[in-house]
Every structure is written in C-alpha cells, then in structure tokens.
Image: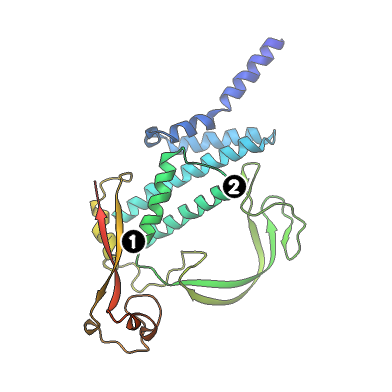
Amino acid sequence: MIKMVLKIFIRSRIELMFYLNVYEELKTSRFHNINFLEYKKKLEEEKKILKTGHNQDELLKIWFIQTAIEIIEQYYECFSLLKKRSYQKAWNILEKIEISFINIKFNNIIYSDCPVLVYIEKYTYMLQKLYPYKIFASPEMLHKKVVCSVCGKTMIPFSDCLHIAGKVYDGEMCYGIVKELDFINVAMVTKPNQKYSVCFQDIENPKRYKVLEYIIPKLKSEFIQWTYNIYTDYEPYSNYKIGRNDLCPCGSGKKFKRCCLLNNQGIAYPHYEFTLP
C-alpha cells in the first residue's frame, strides 16, 4: 500500500514537471516547433493543481513560462504585421512585449539562459527605435478608488491590501482595478508611460515609415541577426519654408527657433546604416 502511494506520488510529481520541460525547449531552437495552444492549456492545468499546495516558487516559474510563450507568440504576430506594412498595429504589439519584460524583471526573474527571450527583448527595442513616432498623448487621471485583483480589497485611497501591483501571487500577477477616477487633462510628451497613444499624422500610411519600408523587406525571417548605427545628418534650411515659431520639421515637437535653428547646420534627421547577414 505504501509503495503504491509512493509510486502515485512520484508519477504525479513527474507529470507536474511539464513546465520545466517546456522551459528547456524554450532555451533551445526547439521552440520553433512548440504547439503554443496545447502547451498553454497544459500549463494552465498544471498551475491549477499546484495552486492547491500554494507553492509560490513553482507557480512563479509557471507564470514566467506562460509569459515567455506569450512574448514569443506576440513577436511572431508583430513580424507578420510588419511584413504586411501594418506598422501601427505592430508598434502596439511591441509595446505589449516591452511591458511583459518589465513585469518579468519586477518579479526578479533571470532569463539570460534563454536565447529566444534575450533576442526578442533586444530586437523589440531596436524595432521601436526605427519608428518615426516622437510625440505621445499622456492622460492625467486621479484614481479615487482602486481595488486589488488578488484579494479584492481597496488599494486606493487607503490600503487594506498587502499585495503589490506587478508582483505574482499563486501564479497570477497582481494589478489594480480602477473603480472610480477623475479625468484631469492630456499632456503631449516625448517619453510616455504608455506608448500606445501616438500623435502622428497619417498614421496608417506605410509611406510615412521610410526606415521600416527599407529594412523590413530585407529581413527573411523573424530570428536573424542584424544591426544598425544611427548618425545625425542635416538638410539645408533652404529646403524648407518655415517660420521661427512653426514646429521644427525634424519632428521634435519643439518650435523651429528653439530646435534646429540653433544648430546652424540645418534640419537634423537620423541617418541609418544597417548590417545584414
């Protein structure tokens, strides 16, 4: 009887190690062959079982692997959108990926042994730098009542909750649910907290994305090594008909007299030099 129980326990523990096997696959080139839908289903089932024991270390690992799979899926989707010249939609996916990496780091998870995640993090930033977006709308709001997604208790204006937004508990990330708020205003900023709110004329026109139009057709697959350097070059002032108080043509969002007029060289623009395999 004892042997039977022991065998059942050992078999159960082996079955519950599925998430570790998945991570081993993510650390190799085998991630290309992963059935994401099937793996996500199995990971969710495994997480439900582990929740009964409240093993926070194992549940955190499963949350991380689920997030890693989501990142890889999103990167594939982003690359597909870039190939279709749907640049704004791809930008929004890149923002989701960036936020996922921020959440992983906030939970003190190290993933330097996972090349695919290291690659995606690097190239997410590189692709974002190729976009012409410079001005963003930043809404300012007063959160009057926020409750915790984990325990349902109030986080704002006073806290009955011991959970920290962004931390993972029982395999789920804690976040605040805004119940009441006052809208104050919208500011135009160059370094936004959220990059979705882009202020860009003719945003869906692919021809407005000259650098991406150049490089994306040259990328034959999602996971190849390529790089670039950015230099500042200048166009003659005579190429533009612009007043001192007009917005500077460089796209900085500043007035001409407070921007490129001061450099005495011309209208600044980034010059890209790409290195491809």
Residue pictured at 71% horizontal, 11% vertical: 2
Q: Secondary structure at mark 2?
A: loop
- Give the mark, 1 or 2, whose residue is nearer the N terminus: 2
Asked whether 202 or 276 is in front, the reply is 276
98 on left or right of 252: right
Task: Give coordinates of residue 85: x percent, y percent.
Answer: 30, 59
The three-letter code of the residue at mark 1 reads Leu
211 on left or right of 10: left
- Residue 143 versus residue 243 in the image, above or below: above
Task: Give coordinates of residue 171: x percent, y percent.
Answer: 62, 42
- Residue 194 versus residue 217 in the image, above or below: below
Residues under labels 1 and 2: Cα distance? Answer: 29 Å
Asked whether 184 or 224 is in front, the reply is 224
Say whether marks 1 and 2 touch (CB < 8 Å): no
User: Badge 1: how crowded within 10 Å, few (<14), some, or many (20+)?
Assistant: some
Residue pictured at 43% horizontal, 49% vertical: 121
The three-letter code of the residue at mark 2 reads Asn
Residue for badge 1: 130
